[in-house]
Amino acid sequence: YLNLLSWSDTNILAVALDKTVYLWNAGSGEITELCTVEGEAEAHISSLSWVQEGGSHLAVGTYSGKCQLWDVQACKQLRSMDGHTQRVSSLSWNEHLLSSGGRDSI
């Protein structure tokens, strides 16, 4: 079970394809490559989630158990968080607090 699409309230669709996250602006039709996960052979994107209420931050979960936080306006990774031993399959925001769920049940 993977969450590879997330639509922001600013009308931008984040799509994960294998190791890369793309952003599609529904208003302009522009497509931007946000990031590519490097590392192990199994390092691909397993979940995405936008912060709500007009935010420009996107949470990215990986198969290797990392949670990354990206500022999409600057195209810059803000932080990478460990804590899971297996893929991060779900991400959810409550205002500016991020929760993650993984295959490891942590």
Image (cartoon, grey):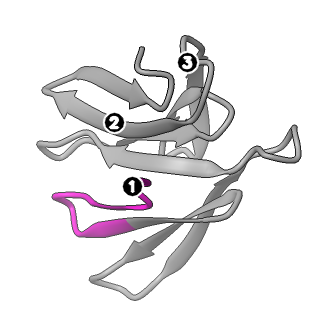
Describe the element under mark 2 as helix, strand or loop.
strand
Does residue 31 appear left or right of residue 89 in this picture? Answer: right
In this picture, which residue range is highlighted in magenta?
1-13
Rendered position, 31 above or below 71? below
Q: Residue furthest bottom?
A: 29
Identify the residue at horizontal 42%, vertical 14% (top origin): 106
Image location of residue 16, percent across then percent down: 54, 63
Identify the residue at horizontal 44%, vertical 54% (top origin): 2
Image disc number at residue 84: 3
- Give the Cα separation between the discs numbered 2 and 1: 8 Å
Task: Say which amino acid is labelled 3.
Answer: His
Identify the residue at horizontal 55%, vertical 30% (top origin): 68
Task: Say which amino acid is labelled 1.
Answer: Asn
Rendered position, 22 above or below 82? below
Image disc number at residue 91: 2
Does residue 18 appear left or right of residue 54 in this picture? Answer: right
* Tally of numbered discs: 3
Q: Residues within 10 Å of mark 2 (few under 14, many from 20)?
A: many
Does residue 18 appear left or right of residue 68 in this picture? Answer: right
Image disc number at residue 3: 1
Q: Is residue 6 magenta?
A: yes
